[in-house]
Image (spheres, rainbow, N blue to C red):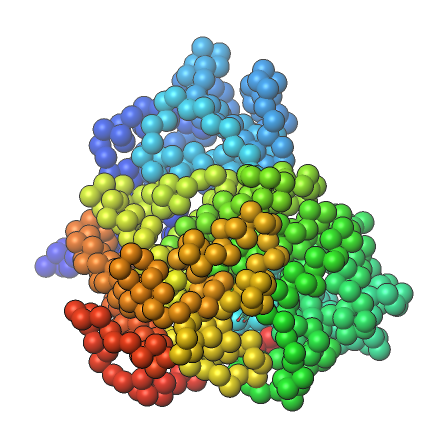
């Protein structure tokens, strides 16, 4: 009896250990479940030779050993000499074999690239993972492990990989009190209170996960900044994180509050042209670099939504950015200066803007179309920034909407280094309850053609520096990570972190390939699972657009928390925070005329781009309400009016979510019950929210169109007043800059 109990306990423990809570992300390393393949892998890999002569090589060796032992369920030896079927990994300085191998070839690996090659050395068949730098070896190791985890053949490998973009960075909007602005996966993983004494295992797993997809930078703090992080006490905490991340090739960055010299430095001004202010920042940088010699630099939100900035002193963005650039340059740091600005005319240095609250200055706004404002402010400064400044531009002109045209700035500043800012956290994409794979959105922007230097001048080429010969390049993703056990709240939100890293490294990858490899590593290699799951992922973003903001609608969500639909809101503190400002529905039609007869925002694009969008008859319907005020009875499709099309799209969106639910339900037998159930329940919430969006938006827009819902569509289960009355004062993700 006792024995039986013991056996039962052992089984229980084993099951519990196997619990799939999502913590392991895409680095699960479970035993290869295809017997033939497992045998092949076991035959090809007997041991590894990787001299752990640096912290980075040491973690590379440990990762390789752990992963192989687990994947192959076999003891892997770490050896000094070469034997057949071993993996030889290293740099020219850590391994004489790698040295020979690399000098025999004509490789151009830069600081982070690597080669993986099946070859013969001393008559023995080996797999070489070689790089010019330690971090290149770690990237090569993770890539090799990805091949195994995705069941690829490894007998005849010939891979050379170099990142397209230098600085591949996660921006955390994490506050020092651990709330996260627009965070939906718990509180911040940075436990500022217990740092620097306590190193949470999560910090290491965070670094591993990032290194596995090539992310090499982390901005720890919110762009709505708190100057305290620049005090000695906090810098010691930052240093502790930097020390953990260093072996994984990850630099830390901080957000710098423009008014810090006043707030924590005791100065009377933060004027960037004041020498006392400049000296203060110079000294601050000296202090930081004495603690963290490889500190990455600063990310700065200035003169935007209440954040102070140089304009408070009559100076320009260039004056501000260059001051930081000069303080960082001697240490090799960079400045990422955000272009997310709109209408400076109403801002005062110390005013705190909070959307949804009325401000005394709102009456003074005579704003130009918000779409145009970043361009209006930054275009005249082209060529005025220092060499270590990157201007960080959000992918679209407004704010991370489900679909935006690319920001016109990408085609407008050839003498300035521009970096991309994507948002991984789903502020406007269903937050953490909706399954939305963002790679198709990222790709849509990256492949968009600015035509600045003729056809083929894609946004990707602006960002990777090849179009304008930039010396510093960068891309940022606003992180979707919190302390939820699965990191991102929704199991599928992990794929957005993953996709960002993969595309930052290689923007030529397709969304389909990224979905495929993520699913294989995260869930299963079984094609009966993969095919439907991939379809769910690849259609999910378009589905969300359909039930939230079809046909180019944008910014019609709830005020402040941005949760749910609220196209009727017309009383926010600023005109351009109101949904009515963006959809402009009236009895004549709907949409924002941004052609020459309207705000003429279109003129900020190259004429070739304008041509795509400036004629309502030829404009792709995905963008039509971004650029045109379209009559309700306009024939947008053969036989379909705009109103009918709107109804059609919203209903298609709901139907597609229901299809996702059914497709997911068919996958129960292929994966663990925990994550299956998680996703199943979340899809239930998503369906409810999709129906809510459809009903609320169509009922509201119907008050203008005065046209009936086409027969055979589901009728709304409530009236418009019901939807308007819904309130969510405690919706997540708002936390201030504490
Ligand atoms: O997307 C909007 C968000 C703000 C955010 C701001 C920004 C950090 O609603 O919460 O603030 O943009 O990007 O600065």
Q: What percent of the width, then of the height, locates residue 442?
A: 47, 51
The quarter of the image holding the C terminus is bottom right
Q: Residue furthest left?
A: 1
Image side of residue 531 versus residue 238, left or right = left
Q: Residue at left 46%, top 49%?
A: 444
Q: What percent of the width, then of the height, locates residue 689?
A: 31, 72
Is residue 654 visible in the rendered image? The answer is no
Is residue 282 visible in the rendered image? The answer is yes
> Compared to 726, does 185 lie above or below?
above
Quadrant of the image where one finds ligand 1: bottom right
> Compared to 651, does 119 lie above or below?
above
The quarter of the image holding the N terminus is bottom left
Q: What percent of the width, then of the height, locates residue 57?
A: 56, 37
Q: Residue furthest right?
A: 275
Who is closer to the viewer here, 10 or 292? 292
Image side of residue 647 versus residue 339, left or right = left
Who is closer to the viewer here, 65 or 225? 225
Q: Residue at left 22%, top 56%?
A: 664
Image side of residue 656 versus residue 329, left or right = left
Q: Residue at left 42%, top 24%?
A: 157
Q: How many marks?
A: 0
Image side of residue 602 versus residue 707, left or right = right
Q: What percent of the width, then of the height, locates residue 366?
A: 65, 78
Q: Residue at left 54%, top 62%?
A: 595
Residue 705, quarter of the rendered image: bottom left
Residue 488, quarter of the rendered image: bottom left
Who is closer to the viewer here, 36 or 69? 36
Residue 635, quarter of the rendered image: bottom left
């Amino acid at each position: 009896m006792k024995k039986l109990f013991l056996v039962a306990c052992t089984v229980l423990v084993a099951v519990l250990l196997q619990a799939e809570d999502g913590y392991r992300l895409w680095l699960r390393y479970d035993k290869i479940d295809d017997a033939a393949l497992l045998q092949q892998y076991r035959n090809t890999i007997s041991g590894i030779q990787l001299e752990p002569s640096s912290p980075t090589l040491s973690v590379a060796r440990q990762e390789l050993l752990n992963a192989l032992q687990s994947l192959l369920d076999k003891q892997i030896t770490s050896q000094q000499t070469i034997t057949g079927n071993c993996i030889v990994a290293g740099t020219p300085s850590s391994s004489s074999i790698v040295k020979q191998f690399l000098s025999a070839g004509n490789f151009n690996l830069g600081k982070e690239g690597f080669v993986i090659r099946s070859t013969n050395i001393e008559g023995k068949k080996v797999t070489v993972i070689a790089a010019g730098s330690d971090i290149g070896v770690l990237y090569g190791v993770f890539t090799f492990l990805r091949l195994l985890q995705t069941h690829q053949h490894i007998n005849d490998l010939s891979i050379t990989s170099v990142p397209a973009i230098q600085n591949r960075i996660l921006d955390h909007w994490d506050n020092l009190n651990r709330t996260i602005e627009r965070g939906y996966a718990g509180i911040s993983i940075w436990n500022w209170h217990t740092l620097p004494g306590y190193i949470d295992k999560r910090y290491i797993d965070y670094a591993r996960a990032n290194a596995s997809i090539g992310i090499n930078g982390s901005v720890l703090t919110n762009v709505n900044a708190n100057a305290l992080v620049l005090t000695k006490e906090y810098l010691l905490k930052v240093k502790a994180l930097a020390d953990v991340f260093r072996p994984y090739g990850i630099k830390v960055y901080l957000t710098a509050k423009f008014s810090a010299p006043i707030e924590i430095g005791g100065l009377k001004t933060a004027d960037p042209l004041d020498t006392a202010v400049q000296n203060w920042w110079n000294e601050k940088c000296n202090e930081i670099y004495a603690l963290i010699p490889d500190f990455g630099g600063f990310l700065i939100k200035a003169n935007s939504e209440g954040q102070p900035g140089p304009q408070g002193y009559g100076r320009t963005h260039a004056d501000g950015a260059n001051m930081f650039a000069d303080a960082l340059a001697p240490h090799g740091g960079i400045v990422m200066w955000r272009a997310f600005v709109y209408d400076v005319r109403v801002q005062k240095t110390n005013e705190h803007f909070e959307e949804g609250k009325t401000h005394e200055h709102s009456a003074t706004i005579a704003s130009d179309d918000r779409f145009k404002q970043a361009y209006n402010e930054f275009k005249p400064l082209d060529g005025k920034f220092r060499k270590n400044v990157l201007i960080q531009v959000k992918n679209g002109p407004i704010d991370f909407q489900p679909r935006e045209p690319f920001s016109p700035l990408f085609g407008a500043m050839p003498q300035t280094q521009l970096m991309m800012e994507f948002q991984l956290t789903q502020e406007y994409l269903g937050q953490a309850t909706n399954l939305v794979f963002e790679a198709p959105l990222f790709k849509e922007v990256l492949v968009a053609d600015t035509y600045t230097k003729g056809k083929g001048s894609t946004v990707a080429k602006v960002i990777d520096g090849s179009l304008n010969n930039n010396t510093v390049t960068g891309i940022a993703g606003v992180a979707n990570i919190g302390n939820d056990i699965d990191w991102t709240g929704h199991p599928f939100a992990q794929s957005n972190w993953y996709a960002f890293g993969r595309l930052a490294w290689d923007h030529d990858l397709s969304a389909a390939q990224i979905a495929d490899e993520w699913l294989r590593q995260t869930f299963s290699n079984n094609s009966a699972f993969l095919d439907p799951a991939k379809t769910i992922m690849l259609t999910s973003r378009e589905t969300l657009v359909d039930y939230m903001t079809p046909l180019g609608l944008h910014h019609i969500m709830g005020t402040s928390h941005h949760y749910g639909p609220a196209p009727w809101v017309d009383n926010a503190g600023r005109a351009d925070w109101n949904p009515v400002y963006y959809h402009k529905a009236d009895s004549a039609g709907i949409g924002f005329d941004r052609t020459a007869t309207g705000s003429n925002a279109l003129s900020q694009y190259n004429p070739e781009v304008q041509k795509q969008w400036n004629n309502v008859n030829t404009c792709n319907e995905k963008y039509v309400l971004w650029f045109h005020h379209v009559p309700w009875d306009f024939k947008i499709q053969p036989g379909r009016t705009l109103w009918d099309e709107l109804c059609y799209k919203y209903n298609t969106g709901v139907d597609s979510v229901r299809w996702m639910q059914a497709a997911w339900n068919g996958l129960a037998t292929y994966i663990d019950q925990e994550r299956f159930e998680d996703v199943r329940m979340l899809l239930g919430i998503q369906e409810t929210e999709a129906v809510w969006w459809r009903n609320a938006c169509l009922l509201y827009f119907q008050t203008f169109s005065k046209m009936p819902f086409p027969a055979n569509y589901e009728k709304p289960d409530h009236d418009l007043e019901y939807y308007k009355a819904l309130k969510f004062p405690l919706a997540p993700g708002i936390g201030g800059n504490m």
